[in-house]
Image (spheres, rainbow, N blue to C red):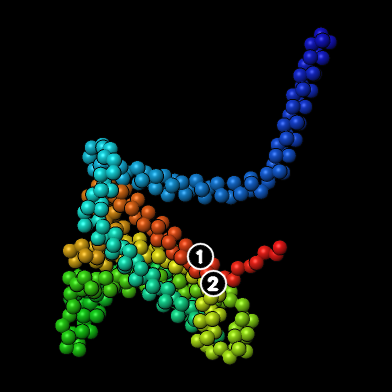
Amino acid sequence: MEKSSFTVNGQASLQNSVKVSSQSALKKFTKKHRDAIIATVILGPMILWWLVLSGFPILFGFLLGFFEWIGIAGSPKFVGIDNYIRFFQDPLYYNALWRSIWMGGLVTVVTLTAGFGAALLMNMPLFGKGVYRSIWYIPAVTSAVATTQIFNILLDTNNGVINNFLKSIGKEPIIWQYSVFWGVFWIVVYSVWKGVGGAALIWLAGLQSVDPTLYEAAEIDGAGRWGKLMNVTLPGLKPIATYIVITSLIGAIQIYEQVLFMTNGGPYGQTEVLVFRIYRDAFWDFNMGMAGASSLVMAVVVFVVTVLYYRWSTNSDRSNTIPLKRGK
């Protein structure tokens, strides 16, 4: 009886000591890796959210490019790189890619130029500048569906605001939908109008980060407004310019909503860009294989353009920097 009681008490004591030691080890581990645990708790849901909404679809789209699959019928058939070969042989695809690049570049240049001018105005001591800044940013947060419909009302062939004005001054109305030039023109105008507010606010942040003492030194040296702009403002904006050019170019190359709601790729597919072509392949023709291949080509093009611009920007910084000589 005493031996049995001693055994039970010994086992209980051993379990308690193991429990205490495990709790102590857990406390030590938690204390040692406290920052990593906090980061995991904060970032874990975000990473999981990204994997579900973006990571797995990206991987799935990449794999689709190697299959022939009509999504509503049949099963996927592995075809290797046939979809990619077709992409570069079919003018429907490589012309759409070329339009995405040059239209995206045009939108980027105009948006950044107009945004910089707006940022200079925002940086001036104007009355009610908070309201002024908000007005510039309204298009960026307004639904593309609503704003494109406003543009369509303006451009309606029969009763559009612009054509009614042309009729009132004795001019012939313009059939916008049949003109490649006007189709591209209004896509670019809408894209710039939509993006200039965001670009202006980023430029404004860069302008306000330039050291004011540099302007004072330039003024002492006799520099005027143009001299201070070229020798103080623009060099000080170089880091922010790299960021804004890259992000704006990535967004502009992937133009989609403007084409869908304003021209629908017309006339005769002459305003069709690659993202719109991907949308048509996937959801109109159910050609999932070509949609996946085109998506991968688009991703590679965006990556290459980004890397080339970044390397050019960093190389120009190195060439304009005086190297430090190490002491012997």
Q: Residue furthest top?
A: 1
Please give the label number shown on residue 320: 2
Residue type highlighted by circle 2? Asn
Q: Residue at x 20, y 84 (%)?
A: 166
Looking at the rendered structure, the secondary structure element under dot 2 is loop
Residue drawn at x 41%, y 56% is 303
In the image, taking residue 78 as reference, residue 138 lies left or right, namely right
Tell me the element at label 1: helix
Q: 291 or 170: which is nearer to us? A: 291
Instruction: Please tell me the numbered disc located at residue 111.
Output: none
Q: Identify the residue position indicated by label 1 in the image.
A: 314
Q: Quadrant of the N terminus?
A: top right
Quick one: 229 or 167, which is closer to the camera? 229
Residue 25 vertical placement versus 178 (above, below): above
Label 1 crowd (10 A; few <14 / some 14-19 / many >=20): few
Would residue 103 appear left or right of 232 to someone viewing this image? left
Task: Pick the quarter of the image with the C terminus.
Answer: bottom right
